[in-house]
Structures are given as C-alpha cells and as structure tokens.
Amino acid sequence: MRDSRKDFFLEPRMEEVPFLIHGFGTGRWKDSDFKRRPEWKDFQLVFLNQVHSDIIRIIDTVPQEKIRGDAMITDLPFLLLFIKTADCLPVLVADRLRKVIAAVHCGWKGTSKRILQRVIQRMKERYGCRSSSLLVVMGPCIGHECYEVGEDVFQIFKEENHSREFFRPHPLRREKYFLDLKGANLSQVVSLGVEEKNVFSTDICTHCDENFPSFRRDKNKAGRMLSFIGMSL
Ligand SMILES: [Zn+2]
C-alpha cells in the first residue's frame, strides 16, 4: 500500500479503477479535510453510528441523520462512505463491473458475526455482484502480534463455529490469546469465492505505528482514523 500524500494510504489496484475514490486516513486526516479538497466538492459524506453490530445499511438515498450500523453498500455515485476505527479493521469492497461499493467496520464482534461475509452476500443478492469482479482492501488495524484477547472472545468465536487457527495462545498468560483479525476476515472473503489475488492489505499495525490512532495504546485519548470509498461516474 502506497503512502500517497502522507495523509492517507491508497491501494494501487483500487486506484487503477477510474471511477473509484478511496483511502485509509492517518490520525491526522479529519472529516473537515475532505471539504477542502476541490476534486471531492460534489461528494456527500456518509457516516454511520457504529455499534459493533452486523447491521448492514443499503444506501439508496442519502440519510438525513446518522444511521446505526457497521457496514454500508451503495451503487450511487458521488457519495463517500466512511468507517471510523482505532485498532479495528476497516475494509473497503468494490465491484468493478457492477459499480457497487461497500465500507465495513470489522472489530472482533463484527468479525465473530461475519459482517464482511454478509456484506459480500448482500452485494451478490441485491446487485448481482460476482466474486470474480470484487476487489477487497483491508486497511491498517491492530496486528496479530499485538491484539491480545481473553477467553471470552475465544469462546464467542468457538460458539459461532469459527476456526481456531486465528487464535494463538499467549506464551506466558493462561486464557489469553492473540487474535488475527485480518486472517479471520480474509477467510470469510475467500470462503465466498473471492480470489486471494483480489484481496489486498497493509502490514501496518495501528498499535505499533503512531501515525495511526490505537484504542489499545491511547485508550480514551485515541482519535479515529477515517477510511473511505466512493464513485464518480
Ligand atoms: Zn503491533
């Protein structure tokens, strides 16, 4: 992933698609910065009230108020769909042929509920998207070396029939694990037939890289990074 203008990161394979606009902002990049960019002046910004759910919103008209949910799908141009995170995994999805996009918030709760898998299913059912034309980009999140979770999280994934391979037992502490959030989400995408060559991700760990907000590192002082995707005509 390329450090474009130091304010946000871009995935080159997404940049190649002429009608797509996307990025993963650092902690410095704020929503007011979007309004200052002349090339995006025709775009409307759409934010969710994120609640660590598996609620998916289809955006057919621009909501007048912030709506609850953790994923958005649209085929409308001139919207920028936003996901705010600080350690959770932001995922952007685009269908190059059908011109459908999605932005998804994948924390451990959403991941345990398979929100990303459900988003891709909805894209297929509602818009006729095919796995072969999807591009999936996973943004910066807390890395599997840093993301310590407890037995409660392990048990919830077990109850939801997730593979244990995404949990590495802590070498020193009992009933503690390291969770591979990206790996767990990658498996959901691949299970629906998206080829791994069309799934991209950054190696950035938000907990290690101070350019990005990290809830684990900064606690309540942590800001949020903005990930966004939109389409022009
Ligand atoms: Zn780290």
Image: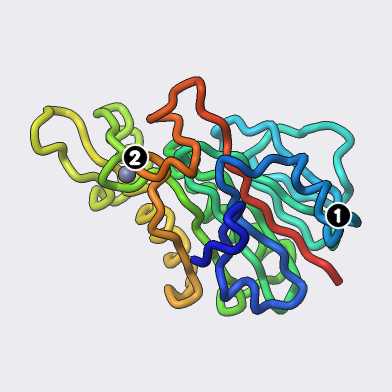
Which residue does the numbered mark 1 point to in the structure image?
A: 43
Q: Going from the N terminus, do you reach mark 1 or mark 2 first?
A: 1
* Residue at x 64%, y 46% (from the top left corner): 71
The local secondary structure at tag 1 comes to loop
Three-letter residue code for mark 2: Phe
* Residue at x 54%, y 65% (from the top left corner): 136
Vertical arrangement, residue 198 with respect to residue 101, above or below: below
Q: Nearer the viewer, mark 1 or mark 2?
A: 1
Measured as percent of width and height from the top left, residue 120 is found at 59, 60
For the residues labelled 1 and 2, the Cα–Cα distance comes to: 38 Å
Q: State the image quarter where residue 176 is shown.
A: top left
Q: Residue furthest top?
A: 220
Q: Residues within 10 Å of mark 1 (few under 14, many from 20)?
A: some
134 left or right, relative to 109: right
* Residue at x 59%, y 63% (from the top left corner): 4
Q: Residue furthest left?
A: 172
Q: Residues within 10 Å of mark 2 (few under 14, many from 20)?
A: many
Which residue does the numbered mark 2 point to in the structure image?
A: 157
Q: Does the beta carbon of the residue at mark 2 sit less than 8 Å from ligand 1? A: no
The local secondary structure at tag 2 comes to helix
Measured as percent of width and height from the top left, residue 46 is found at 78, 44
User: Which quarter of the image is occupied by the C terminus?
Assistant: bottom right
Vertical arrangement, residue 217 with respect to residue 82, above or below: above
Measured as percent of width and height from the top left, residue 218 is found at 43, 26
Q: Examine the rendering and report whether any part of residue 113 can be seen.
A: no
Three-letter residue code for mark 1: Phe
Measured as percent of width and height from the top left, residue 206 is found at 42, 43
